[in-house]
Every structure is written in structure tokens, then in C-alpha cells.
Image (spheres, rainbow, N blue to C red):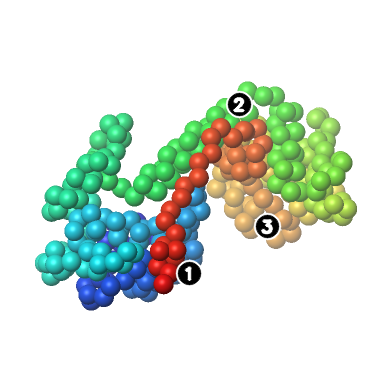
Amino acid sequence: MIPPFQKYLYPFLSLMGDGKVRNISQVSNDLAKTMNLSEEELSETYETSGQNRHHGRCGWARTWFLKAGVLDSPSRGHFVISESGRKLLNSGQTEITQKFLIERFPSFAAFAKARKKDKHCSASEESHYVTDPMNQIEDAFAQLNNKLIDDLLQYIGEQDPKFFEKLVVDLLVAMGYGGDFEDAAKVTQFSNDGGIDGIIKEDALGLDKVYLQAKRWKETNVVGAPDIHKFMGALMSIGASKGVYITTSSFSKAALDVVASNKSLKLVLIDGKQLASYMIKYNVGVISQHSYTIKRVDTGYFEEE
């Protein structure tokens, strides 16, 4: 995982210590090498905006240092270390944080005050200092998503088991299983189903099928290894090779171990939180309320000769 935003600050300043004039693209490339970031880390994006995390962190580090007077901007889109920045670098201070910049540089303190988090934030010391706004958006998005997951599980819990079985079939169809054709999936007879609650065609011709088990259980009623063994027995009795076990609760470690050690069947376990997350992603039982587009400066436009 890519390092936290504040871990970018000292490497950024240290890089600029060579006195070279750079643009943000050059810093982004140079920092990736200096910080030994992997290809996987460099490909990370913010969930809400799709913006690259590494580029975003570089951009905000530049903004902070410009606000603190640690960098100067000799021309549009370019920056270089300032005398204040060189003094800071030569001071031996390797841990550069929001708190440090606020206490050391009045201009940054004014910037931080203007963007200070509201009074509903945590009372911890760090909550009084400016953070990467994109991270704030990510945090808010995660909070809303977690609340939606809890709400979905509550609504599911208020329905009868038969509705839940239909829900999981609808979800898998929305995920692309079965294709866009009639009778892509069906719920089996509610009683005496031998441990199988649904069948879904994996391809448009119905050449392969996935068998479902759906349990609308309370959070405290954990699915154990015996439940998984029963489902596996039901699959093998009809010669099936693929199964999905979905529950609104969770799976015990023993149940997870059974699936991990199984070699004869392809089994997927989906717990309550995963189920609700898939419902959100594939728009089953949810509707969009608001949509926002986050834009950023196209640095390439301004760096063109």
C-alpha cells in the first residue's frame, strides 16, 4: 500500500534539495524512484474520483510547501526550493508533519486555519490540522458506504428467507451471470431443496451452472464447518462443481478452512458485508442519491511549450 500522505513530505523536500527547477510530473516520477514505490503502489487510485493516489500526494505536498514558503515558483507550473526550504533541510529535521509546518511557518498556519476541519471531527490533536482533502472525501465516502451496508443488512433481515433467496439470484444476474436472456436463474423449491436454494446459468447457453445456498441469519449466528460440508455434499450428490454460499452473518474460521482445503469443488463464500457491498456496486436494492465530479488541474496543458 502506498505510504500515508505525510510520509511524502520529507522525501519531497529532500528531492528538491538539489536546487533543480521541476514541474509536478517530474517530481512525481523522481519521487517514485526515490521512495522505491512498486508498480502496484503507483497504480493505486482514489475510490471516489479515480485520481492516482501517488500523483495526488505529490500535488498536495507541493501545495503545502508553497504555502509554507519552503518552495518558490519561478515560472508557471514550476517550482524550486527556497532559502527557507534549504534552511529547513539543513536543520536535520526529517519528520515533517502538519503540526510542525503550522508551528514553524505562519503562512502555512493561516492556510491550515482556513481549511480547518469542522467541530464535529475527532478531538484528537491531529484533527486540528489540515489534511489532504481527497483523503477527507475518501473518509466521508467510506463512512456513508459503511452506513449503507448496515442499512441494507437491516432491511434484508426484516424480509422472509424466501425473499432473501430471490435477492441473491437477482444479484448474481446483475453481476453478469446468466447473460441477458429469459430463465437465466431460478430459485428452487423453498422446502426440501437438499441444501441448494438457487441455480444460475454461468453462460448464455446454459452449458454450466452455479448452485447457490442463501442463509438470512442473524449476525451472531455464524456459518460453521458443518453447514459448508452439508452444502458440499448437496453439490456432489448432483454432480455439480461450482457453488456460492451467501449469508447475512459471517463464516467461522473452520468454515473458511474447509473451503481453503477443498480441491474437488469451486466454492465462493460471501458474508453479510461482502453481500451488501456487491449490492451497492451492482445497484441491487439501492438507488443513486447524489453524484459529484471532482476535477483537477491538467498540468500537461500548462507545461506545453
Q: Where residue 37 appears, x then y in whole percent?
A: 40, 69
Q: Secondary structure at mark 2?
A: helix
Q: In terms of image quadrants, where is residue 36?
A: bottom left
Lower sequence index among marks 1 and 3: 1
Structural distance between the alpha carbons of marks 1 and 2: 41 Å
Query: For the residue marked with disc 2, what is the amino acid?
Result: Tyr
Q: Nearer the viewer, mark 1 or mark 3?
A: 1
Q: Is residue 115 above or below residue 53?
A: above
Density class for disc 2 (Cα within 10 Å; few <14, some 14-19, many ≥20) is few
Q: Nearer the viewer, mark 1 or mark 2?
A: 1
Q: In terms of image quadrants, where is residue 73?
A: bottom left
Residue 195 horizontal side relative to residue 226, left or right:
right
Query: For the residue marked with disc 3, what is the amino acid?
Result: Asn
Density class for disc 3 (Cα within 10 Å; few <14, some 14-19, many ≥20) is few
Q: Which residue is mark 2?
A: 155
Q: Is residue 125 above or below residue 166?
A: below
Residue 178 horizontal side relative to residue 136, left or right:
right
Lower sequence index among marks 2 and 3: 2
Query: For the residue marked with disc 1, what is the amino acid?
Result: Glu
Q: For this rendering, which residue is in front, 17 or 193? A: 17
Q: Which residue is mark 1?
A: 39
Q: Which residue is mark 3?
A: 262
Structural distance between the alpha carbons of marks 2 and 3: 33 Å
